[in-house]
Amino acid sequence: MTKASRTAIVTGGLSGMGLAIARRLIRDGVDVSIGARRGGDADTVRSILDPQGLSAHVAALDVRSSASVNGFVEEVVARRGGVDILINTAGVYSEAAVIDHPDDVWDDQIDTNLSGTFRMIRAVMPHMKAAGFGRIVNLASVAAHHAWPTNAAYCASKAGLLGLGRCVSLEGAAHGVTCVSISPTWVETEMLRSFIDADIAASGKSREEVRADYAASNPQHQLVQPEEIADLAAFLVSDAGRAITMEDVQVNAGSLW
C-alpha cells in the first residue's frame, strides 16, 4: 500500500488506462493531480470524475509544451510540496505508411508520446532526487517490441520510451528514484473501441464478432482490462516495488506478434 501522504501526477488521466490508474491511486490514499488537454474544461472533468466518486486535482496540461509541463508541475509542488509519483499515459495514435508519412503526423506522435514523457520526467526529477524518493511509470506498448505496417511513428515513439526509461533509471538509482515501463497488448479502452467501430464499418461484422477477433489475436483469447494495468502500476509505485527499475513489463496476454 502506498503511503497516504504521497503525491502523484497522472498525465492523460481522464480516459483509458490513465483514468484507471488515477482511480486506483486515489483509492489507495494518494493525492492525485491529473493533467490532460481537456483538464481545463470543468464540465468535462465533472462528467468524468463525479460519477465515479473521485476527488483529484485536475488541470489543463499539454505535454508537447515545456511551458505547460513546467507550469503544471510547479502548481503541484506549490500545493503539495513535491512530487513522489509520475505516471505518463498521455499519448496519441495515427497511422501512415513510411513512404508517404506526413511530417505533422510523425511529429505529433513523437512529440506527445516520447518527448512529452521526457518533458514530464525532466520537470519532476529534481524534486524526486531532493526527496530521495521517486516512482516513474511510462505507458509504452507491445508496439515498442513489434512492428506493424503504417505504424512507424507509434512504434518508434513507444520504443523510444524504453531507452529513455533506462537512462532515467540509472540517473535516479542513487537517489531512490525508479523508472519502469508497462507495455500492454490490446486494452479495452476508448482507443480500442474506436478501432472496433472502424472494423465494424469496414467488415459488416457484429460488435461481438470484431471484439472476439481482437481477443483471439492473443493466445489467452482475452482483452486486457484497464484495471489490470492500474493494479500493476500501483504495485510498481509502492514500497514493495523499490527494487524494480530499468524494466519493461509486458502485459501481453501471451501475444508474440
Image (spheres, rainbow, N blue to C red):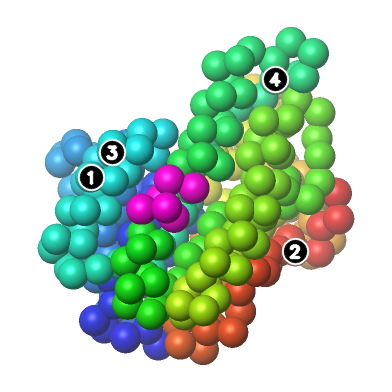
- Which of the 4 quarters of the picture holds residue 133? bottom left
Label 3 or label 4, whichever lies nearer to me, is: 3
For marks 4 and 2, the one nearer the N-term is: 4
Q: Residue at x 67, y 69 (%)?
A: 247
The answer to whether the residue labelled 4 contacts the one labelled 2, judged by CB atoms less than 8 Å apart, is no
The local secondary structure at tag 2 comes to loop
For marks 3 and 4, the one nearer the N-term is: 3
Using the rendered image of the protein, determine whether residue 42 is visible from the camera's viewpoint: yes
> In the rendered view, does 44 fall on the left or right side of 109?
left
Q: Report if residue 99 lies within the magenta region.
A: no
The local secondary structure at tag 4 comes to loop
Mark 1 and mark 2: Cα distance apart in space: 38 Å
Reading the image, the residue beneath label 3 is 68
Q: Where residue 221 sits in the image (x, y, percent)? A: 78, 59
The local secondary structure at tag 1 comes to helix
Per the rendering, the mark at residue 253 is 2
Reading the image, the residue beneath label 4 is 96
Per the rendering, the mark at residue 71 is 1
Mark 3 and mark 1: Cα distance apart in space: 5 Å
